[in-house]
Image: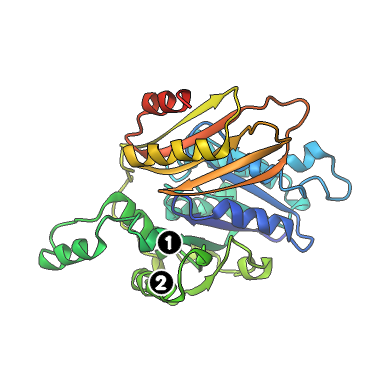
Amino acid sequence: MAAKIPVTIITGFLGSGKTTLIRHLLQHNQGRRIAVLVNEFGELGIDGDLLRDCQVCDEEPGQTADESSANIVELTNGCLCCTVQEEFLPTMQELLKRRDRLDHILIETSGLALPKPLVQAFRWPEIRNAATVDGVVTVVDCEAVLTGALAHDPEAVAAQRQADPSLDHETPLEELFEDQLACADLVVLNKTDLVTADAVNQVVDRVQTELPRAVKLVQSDRGQLPADLLLGFNAAVEDNLEARPSHHDHEEDHDHDDEIDSTHVILNREFDPDTLRRSLEALVQSQEIYRIKGFVAVPQKPMRMVVQGVGSRFEQFYDRSWRPDEARQTRLVFIGRAVDAGAIAQQLAAI
């Protein structure tokens, strides 16, 4: 029987840099044949497009562009940990039919997904004999942790919990952050270029308090880490889940905060980058928006602009030229708590 194909799960909070890390890994894959399963939160696939356009997906010998593009699979019909049986299982079964042509599979979870229910799926007979979880990599946005993006006042929450341990004062986002860390084989402290060395040490202290066992922490600037560091743990995580505690271990089902949702806009128009950025910053101030990402058509520019926002911090870059057969559309996804889609559409229409 052929050896099990190794699978690496890339998890992390919204905007931590998972897609950027995977994109770099694909561009520096050291000859590995890698398939990627992307779980987006919302119907508009942005991360999948970014990975398909990493400009290495059609370079494998003997593959056509269509065949190599099939190595990037999107699931946009809901959070992967909530739709394991309906979405993940049939998709993995299709990927495993091609395992003689693959060396590794990466799974990028949405920022709202719990890793443990996904790992548990690798115990199912339909998957267990063909694949194993090589390791779980959790990506942490250092600046977001420092600015309290995961909790408005972590110290106050901790004080309340110590005063009355019978009460649970953690927010759903805080629990998610802790569960993602607790399941990790490697923690990537990302975006260290945006904070000071002392600030990184603060994040290290915070993260280490959440880790139930010894786990290596590595620093990263824009996910630029070698493949050998991210792959090859041989952890067989599905056989070691007892050492990875979760807030949901004693629940039959788990629930996300029902108010966390997403909306998207598709506009057949172009935007000046600075004007659009100011408008997006205003939206973040007026609503509780955690994440903005998408593609923007810019006047007089032959290339597509990628915009990514985490809280009030934004970055943008041009990833590739617009293709002759595609519309120069602006497509943006907004993820947050009780997102007001009407107010977003109105604000962008006013630009």
Q: Position of residue 67 (x, y in %)?
A: 79, 39
User: Which of the 4 image quarters holds residue 319?
Assistant: top right
Task: Give neighbour class at mark 2: few <14, some 14-19, many 20+ (Cα, 10 Å).
Answer: some
Q: Position of residue 212 (x, y in %)?
A: 37, 72
Left or right? Give the position of 116 relative to 272. Answer: left
The quarter of the picture where the N terminus appears is bottom right
Residue 172: x %, y % from top left: 30, 50
Marks 1/2 in contact by CB < 8 Å: the verdict is yes
Q: Residues within 10 Å of mark 1 (few under 14, many from 20)?
A: many
Q: Residue at x 44, y 64 (%)?
A: 142
Determine the residue positioned at 79% across, 61% down. 31
Q: Which residue is more in the foreground, 336 or 277? A: 277
The mark nearer the N terminus, 1 or 2, is 1
Residue at left offset 35%, top offset 59%: 147
Which residue is label 2 attached to? 199
Q: Given the image, on which type of amino acid does mark 1 rest?
A: Glu
Q: Nearer the viewer, residue 158 or 277?
A: 277
Instruction: Check disc 1 and report the residue beneath it.
Output: 143
The answer for how far apart the CA atoms under marks 1 and 2 are is 8 Å
Q: Secondary structure at mark 2?
A: helix
